[in-house]
Amino acid sequence: MQSDNLIEVRGLRTVLPLKNKELAAPVDDIDLDIPLRKTVGLVGESGCGKSMTARSIMRLLDYPIHIQEGTIAFRREGGSEIDLAAISEKEMRGVRGREISMIFQEPMTALNPSITVGKQVREAITLHENISRSAAKERVIKAFYDVGIPEPEQRYHAYPHQLSGGLRQRICIAMAMVLQPAFLIADEPTTALDVTVEAQILALMKQLQQDNDMSILLITHNLGVVADICDEVNVMYAGQIVEHAEKAELFRRTLHPYTRGLMKAIPRVRGSMEGELYTIQGTVPSLSQMPTACRFCARCPYAQEQCRNEMPSLRDVGNGHLVRCFREVEP
Ligand SMILES: Nc1ncnc2c1ncn2[C@@H]1O[C@H](COP(=O)(O)OP(=O)(O)OP(=O)(O)O)[C@@H](O)[C@H]1O
Ligand SMILES: [Mg+2]
């Protein structure tokens, strides 16, 4: 494992059985590095396999979906390395929530509607730490304060439905952050929120990351969000990484036709509904009909004979920039 990485995913393949009993791979041979103290973006359209990648790392896959191949090396506090793909569920329960945690797309499904938010976050602490109820409560209120929840003592006793979407997502962030994990996965944390609240939540995440020396994997379908807060970007298409680069490099030299399409689809004013927004024509291939050649070629304006016959490999074009495309690249 490279010394500046917190996580190194290699050859990760997550499969699920289709109706005809064949195995499909919504995550197909993924390599992913999460450097220490960096925010890494994972971008792609709906159905590309972003959440499945996150759930694989968290080991939160619903049976019969399972990891078939690959390793997920994780550097623990103190420096020892473990393979999250290989450890037992019991060991994983000690890591999940404490060293690695996740914020989910829809804050309402992540919270239990019949338990006060304070108690839920308190239980996230007492699951891992042997501390008194009152000490845990103090930690919760501080966590609420840290994520900008006004009147945290009162909010402690609120039920999820009594809070706005933005506040609920702040509660989820507090729950994910309260044990100061080294790694946070945020799966479309702002999709359910309006634009101003989105901007506040993204600013909050950036702040928390700096204050806590944490690494973040930020999942989004919006390259505008990536431009705001990521250091590195991975673009995912149909279960594969198709482009990887540092953010500035990716925006300066966008190579994959799919990434170019996503770039053109960034609204000039985020969330604005005015005017025609560019969309990439066609759809992501279904799991049961995954092309054996380039998976994007049916939608690609540059597709040629080779693209329809062979699968391009993810190749290094210099500057730490990787691209899965046959097209010639200017130096
Ligand atoms: N529980 C499931 N059972 C069967 N197929 C699933 C399940 N969850 C996801 N899939 C399929 O796996 C593929 C990847 O889904 P995934 O949820 O990872 O996409 P995503 O990139 O997170 O999309 P979105 O942006 O909509 O959240 C899709 O084809 C999806 O239909
Ligand atoms: Mg998803």
Image: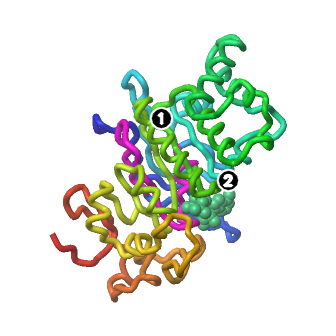
Residue at (29, 38) in percent of width and height: 2
SS class, disc 2: loop
Gap in angstroms between the C-alphas marked 2 and 1: 35 Å
Tell me the SS state at disc 1.
Answer: helix
**What x and y, as percent, mark residue 68?**
53, 52
Q: Residue furthest left?
A: 331
Q: Are marks 2 and 1 in contact (CB under 8 Å)?
A: no
| Residue identified by numbered label 2 | 64
Dot 2 or dot 1, earlier in sequence = 2
Q: Nearer the viewer, mark 2 or mark 1?
A: 1
Residue 208 x %, y % = 47, 35
Amino acid at dot 2? Pro
In percent of width and height, residue 233 lies at: 38, 56
Q: Nearer the viewer, residue 199 or 279?
A: 199
Q: Could you classify mark 2 by the number of other residues whose Cα lies within 10 Å: few (under 14), some (14-19), or many (20 or more)?
A: few
Residue bearing mark 1: 208
Q: Which residues are magenta?
A: 30-57
**Who's the residue at 84% across and 37% down the image?**
114
Please state the total of marks drawn on the protein image. 2
Quadrant location of the N terminus? top left
Question: Residue 14: which numbered mark, if any?
Answer: none
Q: Is-magenta flag for residue 105?
A: no
Is residue 52 highlighted in magenta?
A: yes
| Image quadrant containing the C terminus | bottom left
In the rendering, at what x and y percent does residue 24 appear? 58, 65
Q: Is any part of residue 16 visible from this angle?
A: no
Q: Quick check: can you spot residue 161?
A: yes
Considering depth in this image, is 78 or 142 the residue closer to the camera?
142
Please name the residue shown 59% across and 43% down the image. 103
Question: Which residue type does callout 1 highlight?
Answer: Leu
- Residue 107, compared with residue 254, is above or below; it is above
Left or right: 100 in relation to 160: left
